[in-house]
Image: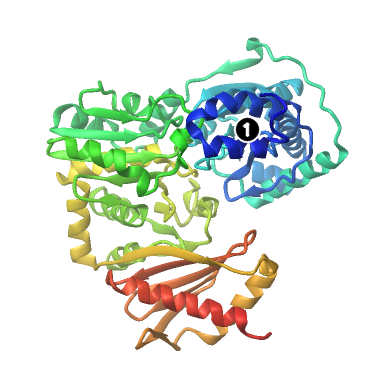
Amino acid sequence: MEGKFRNASECWQAIKAKPEDGRNMLPEIERFARTNSKPANVSFGTSGWRGEIGTDFTFHNVRIVARAIINTLKSEDTAVKKALGIKDFDDVKSRGIIVGHDNRFLGPDFAKEVMEILASEKIKVYYAGETSTPEISASIEMLKASCGINLTPSHNPSNYSGLKFNPSDGGPAGPEITNLIQSEANRLMEGGRALQLHSIEAREYEKIDTTEIYLSYIRQRGTINLDLIRNFARESDCTIIVDHVHGSTRGRPARLLDQSMDKLKLLRTSDDYLFGGVAPEPSADNMKGVERAINESSAKYRLGVIMDPDGDRIRFADQHMQIPMNYFGAMALHFLHVYKGIKGITAKSVGTSNFVNAIADKHKIPVRETKVGFKNFRPFLLPGSSEKAIIAFEESDGISGYNHTLEKDALFGLLLAIEMVATTGKNLSEYLNELLDEYGYYYPDRSGIEVDRSLVGAPLKHKLSVIQERYPKGGSIQINSKTMKISNVITVDGIKVVLEDGSWLMIRPSGTEPKVRFYIESRTPEGKEKIFKTARRLTEEAISSRD
């Protein structure tokens, strides 16, 4: 097969066209990953650097990014050291760095490459092996490590790999850190110089059990009642179903719940580098296996979840409905505040349902809406924050909570959902419907359109800025045949127009693609399409208008 494909992208296209035969082509992908030394443009997005395996994400480029991380850690800039939470590079070497990976193709090999670079600098290395992002986050704090590196592209398709960097507080690195790493990586890429490595020996790293550390973390923090959850799982008439989509969270639920497999059913736990030909994300379509397993059970309490490969995203279901994060995050606020007495604020991304706002308003809980990206919750999750979040969540299936990690955490979501059911004595949908009856019904959705490629980036943002001028707070807007007042306009990320009945539309331009994304929420199911049409109309009018 060698020589059949000109590059890794061609090979991946063939694999995707025929996933059932794709495994046989993976050695060719590995060949490209090991031999391709073409530089990549390194960019850290909302959650790390990602690239196609063998094209951008190669052993050569991983070595360069690892070197860029080390050079950043060596910075003498006081502000940089403060952001990283380190004293100096000697502090980094003694406290150590945790390295782990998900179970994608070549994950252990890429991790070893990073470990060799670190060992060459005499940095203490903790090797987590196959692990999840939230476990690394918790382990950084528990071990007082200087930082963590996880080789994962999260929920991206099978042709991707990635690298996440967490500083000493365990949270996702902010732009004040990632901008430096990517700048240094791209500088090194231009130099194109080979990096001298030595073969790492077992004595040069300490193998750690991040699940055991995570269990200690949960008990120490106290937000989750692990004993209550375990007793419920053992003694109640319940079925708990977890779909791992062939990801690295496999094996975690049984250990967290201290459960045999009689009440715990695990789906898609085998190695499959191609994820069965699907994008491994906690989407509504990917929940079908969970729903089938739930319907096969006759237990009184039924809970099903799906997690992405690195365990930072989760979606829920019971025997009556799927429960996306837009609803579950609001339920979590109510549960933690009303049932557990936790006080603080609510942190949510700007594209998230206002159902949680209604609950927060009733209980006089302040709401903080942030830009898209979990790292924007950092100020509200830090231990010493003056505005500490009871719950922090985003509509794209990420959640954390009071006194918990700064990273989004699917394992936390699973444990919290079980504790909800155990404490309320209700299945999730029963609890949700009670809250909807009390606080009002909300119907969120999202969509988008493509625009001319020439508008990508700043031009598109400039064009859409006219919407804010035309539709200010206190003004009015036509929704189908009805004129509605604008109660608020939020511009932290795109333009969000909130209407008098609590419905809203948000128009958010992509910074890297010729696309405009629409996030909307209606107070009735039939109202969603009317708001979508309005969002499209406002966008098209703004793009066609003259400056």
Residue 116 visible in the picture = yes
Image position, residue 378 (x, y; %): 53, 51
Label 1 sits on a secondary structure element that is: loop
Of residue 263 and residue 402, the one placed in the foreground of this image is 263
Instruction: Tell me the residue at 51%/80% (across/down).
Output: 538
Which residue appears at 69% of the width and 15% of the height?
200
**Residue, x 70% and y 68% (percent of image)?**
454
Q: Residues within 10 Å of mark 1 (few under 14, many from 20)?
A: many
Residue 106 seen in render = no
Residue in view at x 19 percent, y 32 percent: 232
Residue 332, position as x, y percentages in the image: 31, 51
Q: Number of callouts in the render?
A: 1
| Quarter where residue 460 is shown | bottom right
Identify whether 65 is placed above or below 442. above
Identify the residue under disc 1.
146
Q: Which quarter of the figure is the C terminus placed in?
A: bottom right
Mark 1 residue type: Ser
